[in-house]
Amino acid sequence: MAKYWGKMKGYTPWPCTLSSKTATTADVEFFGTGETATLPLSALVAWQDGLSSGLDRKSKAKSFVQAVAAAAEGDATGASPKKKVNKTQQITSFFAAKTQPKKSKASPKASPKAALADHQQAFVQPGRRGSSGKAAKAAKASPKSAAPKRSQRTSPRASPRRSPKAPAAAEEKEDEEEEADSGDDSNDEEAEAEAEAEAEAEAEAEAGNGDDNNDSDNYDDDDDDDDDDEPSDYVKLREANLRRNQAMLAQLNVQRLAQVIGPQPKKKRVAARGLGPARAPKEPVVRRVSRRVQGLDSDGQKLADNFKEPSALAMTSAGSAYYDRERPEGDFDLVVLEIKKKKRGYVEEDSDEEAAAKAAAKLSSDAAIIASLSALPAPSAKNSGAALSHAAFAKLQLAETDFAKTTSERTYSLAFSPSDTLLVAAGDKYGNVGLFRPDVAGDACVTLFSPHARSASMLKFDSRDHNRLYSSSFDNSVRVMDLNASKSVEVWRGDEDDLLTHCAIDEERHALLLAYNDGRFAMADIRQKPGQQVTHYQLHDRKIAHTCIPPAGGSELMATSSNDTTVRIWDRRKLDNRQKPVDNTEVHTRAVHGVDFSPDGSKLLTTCYDDRLRVIPVSSSGKMDADGTVEVKHDNQTGRWLTPFKAIWHPTLPGLFAAGCMQQPRRMQLFSVAEGAGGKAQLLSELGRNAELFSTVTSILAFHPTQHMVAGGNSSGKVFVFR
């Protein structure tokens, strides 16, 4: 059993035995107490019998004496030193060298006992730079107070959990006995040595480094931490990373690349065309007090006898200007409904008699515009759509003249005219309908009308007469703009408090399919007079966002999408309030705000807020194959200020559909779906992704029925045509 003298900061060297060791530390067990600790190898000195004699003079605690005796008895080898050495000088020189490598050595004239006293003082009070002689005496008198606090310990070698408690107790008892016997120790030589050691400690304290007097560095750097001069593993790793990064930058030759690339050219600025931004005149803010309970209006005037309270829908709206607009009723000349434009400024509506008189006074210029619209040629045989292909749509481009501000507010609907003359119609949030002709020069390329008082939710050119444009609105009205007759004709009018969210038109059966905000549905006949009584059916529990019919015709099927997360197919001949559709799919997890039949009616395309576009196979009887659904991940979170996306099929070319996109850089996405069951949807093209002229989100899209063209409208009323 190997025995050692173990050094602990703040304690007298204590006999111990070695349990285990590593390259730098050793686990030891102290004799007499049974405590264990982990010490650096530099804090251990090999055991020699009799080495305690020099310390025994100053360490009279019974526990220390018992520990030394136990160590002597526990010597299994019984070996004695081969030669006699000066035990006091040996242990003094060892511990003095270990604890005070940077301090001045003891005077050569000092006796071994004086050197031993100096050594004991260093053990009781660990070397503190800048500590005074009085502090050293206080630490010597109370070894526990000299021990560092847990928050001050910086070396894991002196962890308080591993420090032996018995040696500390022995030191306290030893000091008590030492004070009791201090009067009996009259050895002048020892007293002289102690005096010299104290004087030397005070001199060293005065000459100590002043930089180490703060609380963050309470301990001296003794030889136990000689390895602290080497860089830590973290510093080595950091330096290696710096060298690696510098080598990588040198290899990439970044500075040379910057010189080759040079400054980026400035983006070309293209003059805006069409309508200017709508700037309403600023009105002074006046603090008003409601006088409604007094029967007075806000100006203090008595209310009319036939005064009608605003509808609940209008009262919940933040924008009163939106609901203050009166719904046009009856038939009007397009000149009356046309909105006059100041030079790229505020626009106002000329819908009353005075405005109509102004419009009539300018009939020469306005009539020319209307006449140019009425002269749209019919579709020619070469534009029958027979030569359309997916590959040609992937190569569409945007020219400087192919976009303009067409409406004054956010785009809600879009439609291409089937005529050979390029014409795009756009409906906005305030019920305005703008006609954009990209091939016309200047601001005359845009003509704006105001046939509705609320959002224009649907636009559709008559497939049999390309000069007739149907439009529906949230104000629960449907109108048709006849460009040949320069008239706006009212087709349907219902209760203005009922919010008409969408309308589909079955031209073959002269039917209007009306979907409402509360989940109701109604059908009206185009040939009857406006205001006819219709039957409403409760098809959904929440808002019907969209409705559609197969484009090929000859079918009584109809599809609806709703905010209640369902898409349903109905037989229009069997509608009732029992909500029994032909089929109902629940593959969607959030509101479905878009649904569209493919050209042959064999597939449904849905747009859902769960960030999915879905292609659902549909049988001729109206049954949906949920297992054969093809999903496309697509960000549909348009937020509050953008119109919700509504993916659409091409009206005549099978397997091609388009959708808006939220990704940067901005783009319009075209997808191709393979024919047959289980056909996957693949991204065909991303129009405008790298175009300098395109940097916006186009929520509403439209295909030209017979030519390779795609149009998109954004939230500011601009229309972009890729061709």
Image (cartoon, grey):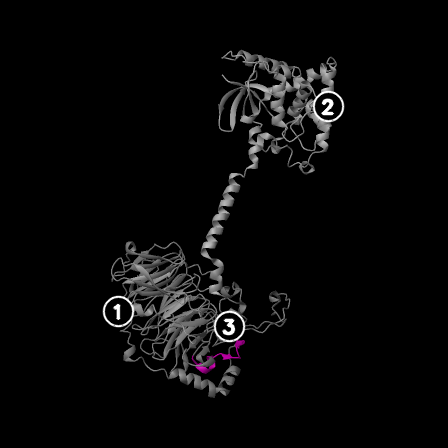
Mark 2 or mark 1, which has the lower sequence index? 2
Look at mark 2 in the image and give the residue it sits on. Answer: 196
Residue 709 coordinates in the image, percent (x, y): 35, 72
- Labelled pair 1, 3 in contact (Cβ < 8 Å): no
Q: Residues within 10 Å of mark 1 (few under 14, many from 20)?
A: few
What residue type is disc 3 on? Arg
Mark 3 or mark 2, which has the lower sequence index? 2
Q: Residues within 10 Å of mark 2 (few under 14, many from 20)?
A: some
Distance between mark 2 and mark 1 Cα atoms: 120 Å
Q: Residues within 10 Å of mark 3 (few under 14, many from 20)?
A: some
Q: Which residues are magenta?
A: 331-347
Q: Nearer the viewer, residue 334 or 204?
A: 204
Residue 309 coordinates in the image, percent (x, y): 53, 67
The answer to whether 525 is drawn above or below residue 218 in the figure is below
Tell me the number on the disc at residue 403: none
What residue type is disc 2 on? Glu
The answer to whether 376 is drawn above or below residue 566 in the figure is below
Mark 1 or mark 3, which has the lower sequence index? 3
- What residue is at 61 percent from the left and 13 percent from the top? 65
Distance between mark 3 and mark 2 Cα atoms: 105 Å
Q: Nearer the viewer, residue 274 or 468?
A: 274
Look at mark 1 in the image and give the residue it sits on. Answer: 554
Residue 168 coordinates in the image, percent (x, y): 62, 21
Look at mark 3 in the image and give the residue it sits on. Answer: 325
Circle 2: element type: helix
